[in-house]
Amino acid sequence: MGGGAEEEKRTDMTNGEEGNQLLKEFQPKKEAANSPPPPPDGGWGWIIVAASFLCNMVLDGIGYSFGIFVKPLEEHFDGAGKGKISLVGSILAGFIMLVGPISSAMVNKFGPRLTCIAGACISAAAIFMSTFSPNVYVLMISYGIVGGLGLGLMYVPAVTAVGYWFEKKRSLVTGISTCGSGFGTIVFAPVVTHLLDWSNWQWTNRIIAGFCLLCTFLGLTMKPVPKPKCESIDSITEMKQNNGPIIKNDKAFNASKEDMEFIDNNEETNKSPDTLPLHEVKAPTEPEKSENGYVTVLKNLPFFLVMLANLPAVMGLYIPYMYLPGITQQRGLSKSESALLISLIGFFNTGGRIVSGAVTDHPKVDALFMTFLALSWGAVCPFLMTFCYDFWSYTVVCIMFGISLSAWPAVTSSMLVEMLELSLLTSAFGVLTCMRGAGAFLGPPLAGFVLDAAGPRTDMGNSTIVDDPASVDVVGDVEGSGLGEMTTMEPPTKEDLAHYEIALYISTLLLGISALGHGFAFCVNKVQKNRRKKQFNEA
């Protein structure tokens, strides 16, 4: 009799263990409910890749083509000067990235679709209204600040939306979508030039505002990843309602509603370390996180180091774009050759993003280490530019510069997901974009102030300097000289004696500092990963 009771007890314990195990398999988890759905790696995601490509083409095309407006705006706002007019474009480019935290917060709250549509409407209205600006200061507010705000609201969803739809090909599709930036630089420059030849700057900007408004249709495609149907959740819910038995391996386990509620309330204790992703493995005494996404990403040391390293990176990146034409023309290249060099950087940077994205998607390639290599080699290229004196040598270095820095924007999303997790991608990218905006503001002016402090160079003795070209006399008809058909003579232009090499040295220094920061972040991230693996194995 006692043996029968003992056997019955063992049977109840066995059934109880199997029932608990089955409940752990079927119970809905809070993390799974709150975290993003698993990326489907295709499907509608390719439509979003195309939409993101076009959004990047429009917003970066607008930003990079502003230099074409400088002369027409200077003529319209008489007395404003190149400095104030150029500041409008700097404000626009800076605000596109400075509003990153605002844009990412809106994406987290309302989703990428509504955020992109709102940005398209705001930027279209701002650029359209800027054509009625009575002075350059109103233009700074309407076109620079408000227009930059709208384009910034388009930028974050255009880059991060594809990351939620792809996992195995995340770097590749991010590279494809960000290629729109380079494509916009190539396309918008001739489009804006032809529009200005056909009309004035006001109507050109009104047409550009129409391009922004069309981006609302692109935003409509950015729907969230659909949540997968979870039959297990339906089954456990139905079981709770009916308080029926759970059948497994021809054995039944009866659980009361009180038992079910107790198990659900203690679901965190039922988690096995083997079921957790690597980034969720934590010490047993660590409390559950319920903090803001921005606080979470800033408390992550590798991300914090990457964020700081992005400031000198963007500062150094923009300097060659700004001062390469000056040093090349100073060394005998024509304006058309200087412009072609800038186009070569953009072209190879665009193509390199696809290649670097595909390489980074390999399981054995670390996105953060790829960024470190890209910035390290990118730091060498501005230094090599100071040793170039002909078009073909500049061509080789510019191609290397474009390819080397192509990996930096292409692998950003994958790098952030590897350091943090997919649910923090938007918040982390918003913070990173804000830091990049600060770098875009500070880089070229810093180099400009250093050039001004250095003064004109004195090693170009054969240069002709004319303080006032207008004071040169106009040559009329000269009797008996054989020059009767020459009525005018072009005045000599003022020779450019700036120390552009100093600006390129500054670019090398800043990119090198950024590379060291990313390298240190990679080492810290490796140490933290090994520590989490050790905790995982001990658990």
Image (spheres, rainbow, N blue to C red):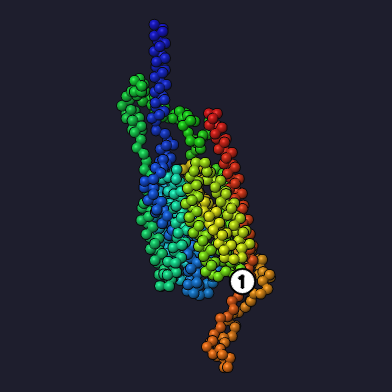
Residue 114 visible in rendering = no
| Quadrant holding the N terminus | top left
Image-based side of 438 in relation to 215, left or right: right
- Residue 339 x/y as whole percent: 52, 66
- Residue 44 x/y as whole percent: 36, 47
Residue toward you, 44 or 272: 44
Residue 248 visible in rendering = yes
- The residue at 59%/46% (across/down) is 519
Q: Is residue 264 above or below residue 252?
A: below
- The residue at 34%/37% (across/down) is 229
- The residue at 50%/67% (across/down) is 67
Residue position for label 1: 496
Q: Is residue 533 above or below residue 433?
A: above
Task: Count the marks.
Answer: 1
Amino acid type, mark 1 = Asp
Q: Residue furthest bottom?
A: 479
- Residue 166 x/y as whole percent: 42, 45
Residue toward you, 431 or 141: 431
Q: Residue furthest top?
A: 1
Q: Is residue 466 above or below residue 70?
A: below
Residue toward you, 226 or 287: 226
**Callout 1 secondary element:** loop
Image-based side of 252 in relation to 405, left or right: left
